[in-house]
Amino acid sequence: MTWTPWHDLRVRTAAVVAFLALAFAVRAAAVALAEPQISPAPPLSIAIRGITRPAPTPAPLAQLVALAPFGISDAAPNAVTTVAAVPPITLVGTLAGAEAPAAICRLGASTARILHVGDTLGGWRLQQVNPGRAVFVDGAFVRHELRLSPVGK
């Protein structure tokens, strides 16, 4: 009997695996190239009947101007603007040379507190501490700089 490659078990196994891989590849290509089955859309007149929209109500121009989305205001130059009440924060001292700078502040007649950057007092958040001054940010993101008053004043 003469030996041929087909008589080896490994060759036959490799041939079966190659045939199965080829069959899977052909099936995957057929699925990928097939057009999907999409149901036709209903007529436009049927689709429109199901939609109800409320009538748009235009916003008053005064409200849109008050928003000032880009910081530009078209308000009249004689327009009255309201300013939020400023909490009576007094800067008593600063510790600016430390690793964690701090400000010593008093709210009204209360006792002085040590505030670190990020702490809040009276609705204002301490943003920055430098020698002799502290910068706070209020709820409207307006910066307020407090300075130490000269000695005796």
Image (spheres, rainbow, N blue to C red):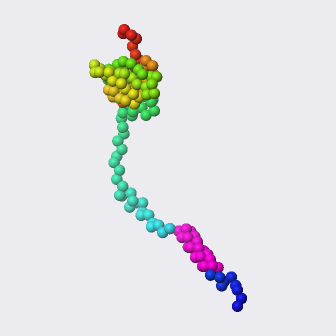
Count of numbered badges drawn on the protein = 0
**x, y percent for residue 79:** 37, 23
Q: Residue at x 36, y 55 (%)?
A: 51
Q: Residue at x 39, y 28 (%)?
A: 116
Q: Is residue 15 magenta?
A: yes
Q: Is residue 97 magenta?
A: no
- Residue 145, image quadrant: top left
- Residue 107, image quadrant: top left
Q: Residue at x 35, y 29 (%)?
A: 120
Please say if 108 is above or below 56: above
Residue at the top extreme, as displayed: 152
Start-end of magenta stretch: 10-35
Quarter of the figure with the N terminus: bottom right
- Whether residue 80 appears in this view of the structure is no
Q: Is residue 110 left or right of residue 28?
A: left
**x, y percent for residue 71:** 45, 30
29, 3: nearer the viewer: 3
